[in-house]
Image (cartoon, rainbow, N blue to C red):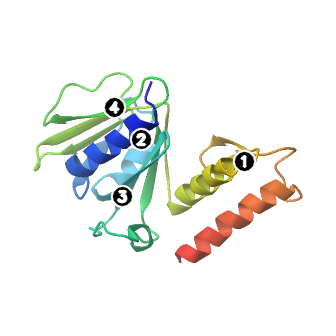
Amino acid sequence: MVEGPSVHRVELFHRRMLQGRVFQATSPSRRFVDGAAAINGRVLPHIEAHGKNIFYFFTPKKVKEEEGVLEKLGLDAVVVHIHFGMSGSLRTFPYPGPEPREATRLQLENKKEGLVAHLSATLCVHGNLELYSCTQVAQEAVAEGVPIVSVYPGMVYGPGKLTAGNSLALMVMLQIYQSFLEAQ
């Protein structure tokens, strides 16, 4: 099982191996076809781990990795949120690499750099920067003791029904909206 420290080791390794490069993305298992199409031919300028979650940020053009990089990614950035689960992995190989396994959701290739990466994970979703912001707000709320459960990136449940009348849901939605406005 991939634990928090292992996810941070993956982050550091992938910053050295993958960050700043352009990849051709495919979904050999056909379970991440739309996500692969969304990041295909894009640059990977930033990788960030939080607990057991890791986020890969893809943009149409290079963005310098420095403090405040998230504010510089732009509204056309695509975020890939990965949670490895019990047995997931994101392995890198010299190109062309081995044949993808049945569980390989995402394959990243860069022939020029001689790299290929295979991802198998319990959770692999893509979206815009709001996906990342929502996940961050939910994780911060949990860390502060708010009794919510993040059941899917961008979807949280707290005590009672998740409606605009639920004060917890309203608080989380307002925090997300405020984070989004501050990023503009």
Q: How many residues crowd around disc 3 within 10 Å: few (fewer than 14), some, or many (20 or more)?
A: many
| Image quarter of residue 42 | bottom left
Q: Position of residue 94 (x, y in %)?
A: 13, 36
Residue type (three-letter) at the residue carrying disc 1: Gly
Label 1 with label 2: CB-CB less than 8 Å: no
User: Disc 2 marks which residue?
Assistant: 33
**Residue found at x 65% / y 64%:** 176
Q: Considering only vertical position in the picture, is 1 above or below 109?
A: above
User: Disc 1 marks which residue?
Assistant: 145
Identify the mark nearer the N-term, 3 or 4. 4
Q: How many residues crowd around disc 1 within 10 Å: few (fewer than 14), some, or many (20 or more)?
A: few
Q: Nearer the viewer, residue 167 or 80?
A: 167
- Please name which of the two marks, 4 or 1, marks the residue nearer to the observer: 1
**Residue found at x 66% / y 71%:** 178
Identify the mark nearer the N-term, 2 or 3. 2
Identify the mark nearer the N-term, 3 or 1. 3
Identify the mark nearer the N-term, 1 or 2. 2
CA gap, disc 2 and disc 3? 16 Å
CA gap, disc 2 and disc 4? 8 Å
Identify the mark nearer the N-term, 4 or 1. 4
**Residue found at x 43% / y 58%:** 78
Q: Considering only vertical position in the picture, is 58 above or below 182?
A: above
Residue type (three-letter) at the residue carrying disc 4: Pro
CA gap, disc 1 and disc 2? 37 Å
CA gap, disc 3 and disc 1? 32 Å
Q: Position of residue 179 (x, y in %)?
A: 61, 69
- Please name which of the two marks, 1 or 2, marks the residue nearer to the observer: 1
Q: Secondary structure at mark 2?
A: helix
Label 4 with label 1: CB-CB less than 8 Å: no
Residue type (three-letter) at the residue carrying disc 3: Phe
CA gap, disc 3 and disc 4? 20 Å
User: Disc 4 marks which residue?
Assistant: 28
